[in-house]
Image: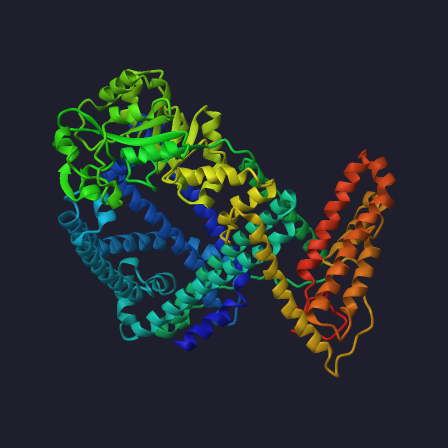
Amino acid sequence: MSEIIRVTLSRLRPAWRQILTIHLCYTGLGIILFAPLLGVLGQVLLKFSGKPALADMDLLFFALSPTGMVALVLFAAATIVISAFELGSLMAIGVTNVSGKSMGVVAALAFSLSRAKQLFHFAAWLVVKLLFTVAPFLLAGGMVAFFLISDYDINFYLAVQPPEFWGAAIIIGIIVVVMAGFLIRRLVGWSLALPLVLFVGTAPARSFSASLKLTRQSSGIILRALVAWALGTLLLGVMVTAGVHFLAAVLVPLFIDSVTLLAILFGLLTALLSIAAVMTTALASGSLALLLAALAHQLEPQFREVDLPSGAQRKFNLTKKTRPWLVLSLIAGVGVATFIGFSLLDQIQFTDDAQVIAHRGAAGAAPENTMASIRRAIADGTDWIEIDVQETADGEIVVIHDSDFMKLAGVNVRVWEANLEQLVEIDIGSWFAPEFSSERVPTLADVLAEVKGRSRLIVELKYYGHDQQLEQRVVDLIETAGMQDDTMIMSLAYAGIQKVRSLRPNWKIGLLSARAIGDLTRLDADFLAVNMALARPALVKAAHAAGKELYVWTVNDALSMSQMMSLGVDGIITDEPLLAREVLTARAELNSAQRLLLYVSPLLGFEAPSLSIESNDAESDDTSVNLELGLQQRFQDRISLPDSVLAEFTSDGCSGGLSVGWNYFAEQLGVFRERHGTRPPWESCCIEHDRAYHNGGGAGLTAAQSFAAREQADEELRACVLTTATDRGDQLRAEYGIDDEQVAALYKTIATSMHLAVRLGGMPCTGLAWRWGYGWPDCR
């Protein structure tokens, strides 16, 4: 196995550019294919429904219908087809590398295209075989769930987890493990099917049995090789992500006082994370293709006789001619990052208008949908209280979420089968805490009387297929209580809120949704209440543009609350209304940069600060200081050795391609040269900075002293650049019509950016030409 892995890695290194390009091509093809396909499917579905959008219940019915199942299979087939084409092109590169040749990208793409018919047939057979493989296991799992955990409301099983729940979980777990083992065994046996189709000419229908025959004696080796590939891919992804997160932790404290620079930084990090993700997936696809080709080459003699035509492959070398293009690419990258950063700024709201909505009362502090939770929500100062209502057998409207009382009381009574007189005997509070043992299921009339004049109410209509006159009875009770101006009605069932609309056209109604197809904002609803996962900047803007409010549920932690508030949602539905109030109070003390930091940190995946920003900033700053102190100590240890000699001073002006790029533009553009000269106006600042960096403070310093010396040199660079604003102020005002304040702002941005660049890239012992102490031998 080790030889196969070695061969795979040896072929991966020279072919990584072709692999990346091919992966990008097929990724683009997938987007081009799937976007219209999803759009067409959505439009067809909406046309048959007669609605501008479909949400939860309608989507569930569609997914379980024959049409929905066929659609899912078609999407799976399309994914497999694209993957097969990509693997074919990548394996073609691997095959040519075996013979010492090199295949270009165009030739590799053409190779798969020339075998399109075989690839489509292969994908069809693979889908069918996969369906027949997993269907019996899925059916068995479904039967276990039906017989063991379908007697009561699903919330009972999830919350209480009775013995039958664990029995079902264990049996289904065993079924899943067996299915996974059987599927892995099958996939290992089929691993050479695609190479056989593409390079040996085996018919797709026969390729699976042929592959099984070839791999029978080597299945253990293949399995270990594939496991090694999977673990390597996972490790690479973790390392890349961790690297970006660490970079964020080090850099963020440097920008915490500037929302503009912080936005640009987050744009850079987002772009870097995206590029890293693309490269990781490209390397994963490429290494898998090369691994399969290596296995086929070892196990199938005919495979060794394959001779594919090679194509010209251009090599990239860094020369004086290509360096300006690198500078231009760097400038373009910064431009893209800036665009991404300001797009982030456009997504968030820097003022807070969100209302606090208590979910089933203050369900985090008292039993849900009880008078205790209602009273606690009022005491916590909530703007709205959300409750769930159903009909009893005798037509009373009671406040309860589940279809039965198993979760709340362990009593097997369904709401629609019992009278109110029976239900009020059930203790629905002790499950939460003994002090709530007196709590009983309240009626809607009870809650209306309690809330009137003290808060406002959102009534969710619950449908379990046994309602009779739910909408009419709810409307009558609200009007009897005189609460129609302080009550809104919502439901997961669009038909239900439309019934309310027909009864009371002027009342505010809303649609609940966890997932949807189409444009929710076109539905006849005054507000939307969506799962937090659905809340995106585009939906918030679309809802507001349509004149609708947008609420999110169920948000129970401070960071998520803050993020949703930054999105500009109109309401936070939460079990913890008091916490939501505290978050609003804490956010009132934050500046714009701190609000941006709280919003972006979950998006980029690094650890977010708490709402107490100051203590977390100090911790992050300590991280960067401790990192550099270790490098400074290594630097001092190295230059104290007898063989350490300080080289003669050299300088490239302003590093990072700034002086080189400036000179290039001056040579190419006469107008630029006439106005700005051939060198940056602050180049003398860079040269003086280089003198300090060349010596690195000298030998005999402690790590802390060397750190302080570098910090002082960087501050002097920033101050020097700022002084050039005075020297060039008259020229800039005359040429561009800007005032003194604008000149100062421009040079402050330049100086801050240069200061950041040297703080980040100037640490010692990095091997970079502009590192601290670059005149001394490298200490890596």
Residue 652 visible to an observer of this rendering: no
Q: Quadrant of the N terminus?
A: bottom left
Residue at the extreme front: 435
Query: Is 324 on the left or on the right of 185, as rendered?
Result: right
The residue located at (40%, 32%) in the rendering is 382
Residue 520 lies left or right of residue 624; in this view the side is left
Q: In the figure, 478 relative to 15: above or below? A: above
Residue 151, image x, y percentages: 14, 44
Furthest-bottom residue in view? 642
Is 165 placed left or right of 285 in the picture? left
Taking depth in this image into account, of 477 and 31 the one nearest to the observer is: 477
The answer to whether residue 745 is above or below residue 657 is above
Frontmost residue, 697 versus 465: 697
Residue 176 against residue 564 in the figure, above or below: below
Which quadrant of the view contains residue 474? top left
Q: Position of residue 310 (x, y in %)?
A: 52, 64
Q: Position of residue 355 (x, y in %)?
A: 44, 31
For residue 502, which quarter of the picture? top left
x then y, percent, for residue 10: 50, 72
Horizontal side of residue 673 vs 383, given as left or right: right
Seen at 46% across and 37% down, the residue is 581
